[in-house]
Amino acid sequence: MDDMQQQSETYFEDKLELLDSLDLIYQMDVAISKRGDFFATRNNYMILNFFVKFFEDLNDSLLLIENKKNSEETNPQLNFLKYINLEGYINFMKEKYPQVGNLISIYYTMYLTRVDKENEEHFYRLKELVLANVEPLNIYRKYNFWIFLQNAVYSNYGLKNKKFNRELFEINKFFLRYNFWEEIFKGYMPGLMFINIVTNANISEEYDWAEKFINEFGKYLEPETRENDLNIARVMILFSQKKFTEALVANSLIKTDSIGEKINLRFYNVMIFSELGDYDSAINELENFRKFINSMKESGKLPVYAEEMTLKSVKHFSRIVNAMAGNKKLDYAYYKEAKNDKSFRFKKWVMEKMEERV
């Protein structure tokens, strides 16, 4: 069974079942005085299996609560946590049985990042626990912990403080050693995973690393979407490296049905044309952008939240591009409005250009 730990998603459950069966034999053939160590091992796996299932199920319950499909007051897991000293028990287990205690601690800290989102220490603690204890776990559990840490940054911590993008960059580098795509994804790296890793490296200004990653891991992308995914990744890095002509070529090669990618493609065109001093093309692109948004809205293909964010982004882009085209100062009120606007696309570029003209 120990040799199965890396391969089996249900390792703890399977081992507990085996130990239960062995216990039945011991009850018949072995004196109770000689069963102490075995009994402790068996019961530790019983507790570990319980808590792993408990917290995995709790994660689903929290999603239901966040979406108003369940009640926090009547949730059995949350009520259970209210009335036990779980932290005290975890500290005891980490001292007595470190492997069991550390794994329970990972799941408990994952829970804390979901319910106490303002406390950054939960994220740092979770990262420390996962990186220190993930090695003996099976490939699926490793992958799930990586995805959870990514989501914690994307959906919470990274939105409030950009320093967490650097944290995620280090986390991504750590987990890439496990080649998840070989065992979990039948030999191919999902395009979204590939692009997210490049995006994070780009935000972290790790351009050389990102370029190396694209060259090394691009071969693992699915053949039918490989060139498209590579071009999406290349545009980001080439633009950040100020290789604008090359970025424009790569952007022109992207073919996608994704509304989100089509929007990104158009924003990149506006930024690239602006950087190249081709302001007529940049302004024309923005005009076509408004028509595109209206057509997507009429067809019902553009979600309301995406429509609002995109229109806000086009407004800020139009103001700065028009100022650049006319070589004029930007109205300070426009700058303040953009600075106070927490959610629009490519804010870093817009703010840099605005700051040059206020």
Image (tube, rainbow, N blue to C red):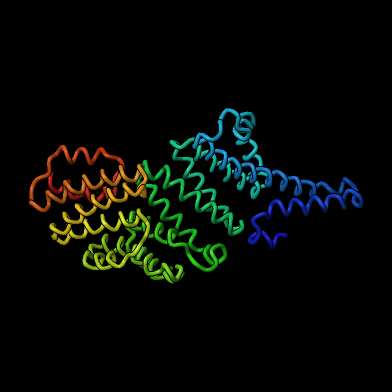
Q: Looking at this view, is 164 or 340 the one in front?
A: 340
Question: Viewed as shown, does residue 304 lie left or right of 281?
Answer: right
Residue 70 visible, this orientation: yes
The residue sitting at 68% across, 46% down in the picture is 48
Question: Image quadrant for the N terminus?
Answer: bottom right
Question: Viewed as shown, does residue 291 lie left or right of 16?
Answer: left
Q: Is residue 167 above or below residue 244?
A: above
Residue 351 visible, this orientation: no
Question: Viewed as shown, does residue 221 lie left or right of 233?
Answer: right
Q: Looking at this view, is 195 or 171 the one in front?
A: 195
Q: Is residue 45 above or below residue 208?
A: above
Picture quadrant where residue 15 is located: bottom right
The residue sitting at 32% across, 65% down in the picture is 254
Picture quadrant where residue 258 is located: bottom left
Whole-percent x and y of residue 93? 66, 42
Whole-percent x and y of residue 123? 47, 44
Q: How many marks?
A: 0
The residue sitting at 17% across, 40% down in the picture is 334
Whole-percent x and y of residue 4? 68, 61
Q: Looking at this view, is 157 or 286 the one in front?
A: 286
The residue sitting at 35% across, 42% down in the picture is 304
Question: Image quadrant for the C terminus?
Answer: top left
Q: Is residue 38 above or below residue 176?
A: above
